[in-house]
Amino acid sequence: MNIMKNLTVFICTLAGILFAATDIVAAPTAYKAVDGDSLEQGTRRIRLDGIDAPEFVQVCYDGGNLEYQCGPDALNYLENLLQDAEVRCDCAENKDKYGREVCECFADDISLNLAMVFGGYAVTYRSDKYLEAERSAKENKRGIWRGKFMRPALFRALERLQNKDAAEKSSAAPKS
């Protein structure tokens, strides 16, 4: 009888441990900002729809024409929006050319896409959805609008062109 009681206690304890472990494994993975317009959730990669933030290596100029790292600023702003928030994303069916989901994401009930543009840490991109927020950021000199900057899409295009030119020059150089 004592053996049956001990066996029952053991099985119940084991079942409780396994149930608790299942809850831990099933807990959602936190969202992480990759840059000013991209998130990751585990292996899931997300591009914030309709916005474009400065590239991580991109430089901007403030109102006094002093250079600053606007890419890391955009990343930090997005990280602050995510901090301690419940995040959800509404995604389009199609992925972008890099295989990322294209989504509008929310931290609690705040649209991250809108907040990034309104705060001046991103510009509109292939969408008119956030134009009013961009106008407000520009008029109030928030974020990148406090000085001079290159639109991120143009920055990327120039980077590709410079990399292509450098590759062509190195392959055309005489071999010694």
Image: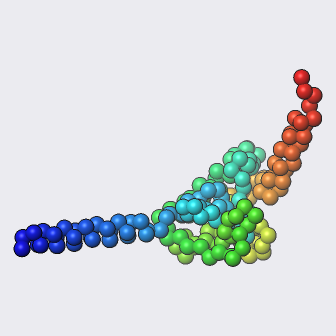
Q: Is residue 69 visible?
A: yes
User: Could you say where residue 11 lies in the image, as x and y percent from the top left?
Assistant: 22, 70
Residue drawn at x 71%, y 69% is 95
User: Could you say which is closer to the camera, residue 62 or residue 95?
Assistant: 95
Instruction: Classify the position of the C terminus by image quarter.
Output: top right
Residue drawn at x 43%, y 68% is 27
Residue drawn at x 73%, y 44% is 67
User: Could you say which is closer to the camera, residue 36 or residue 63?
Assistant: 36
Residue drawn at x 72%, y 55% is 54
Rendered position, 146 above or below 1: above
User: Could you say where residue 168 lies in the image, as x and y percent from the top left?
Assistant: 90, 40
Q: Is residue 134 visible?
A: no
User: Could you say where residue 122 lies in the image, as x and y percent from the top left?
Assistant: 70, 62
- Left/right placement of residue 129 relative to residue 10 reads right
- Left/right placement of residue 22 relative to residue 48 reads left
Tell me which corner region of the image, top left, top right, bottom left or bottom right, holds residue 36: bottom right
Tell me which corner region of the image, top left, top right, bottom left or bottom right, holds residue 9: bottom left
User: Could you say where residue 12 lies in the image, as x and y percent from the top left?
Assistant: 22, 72
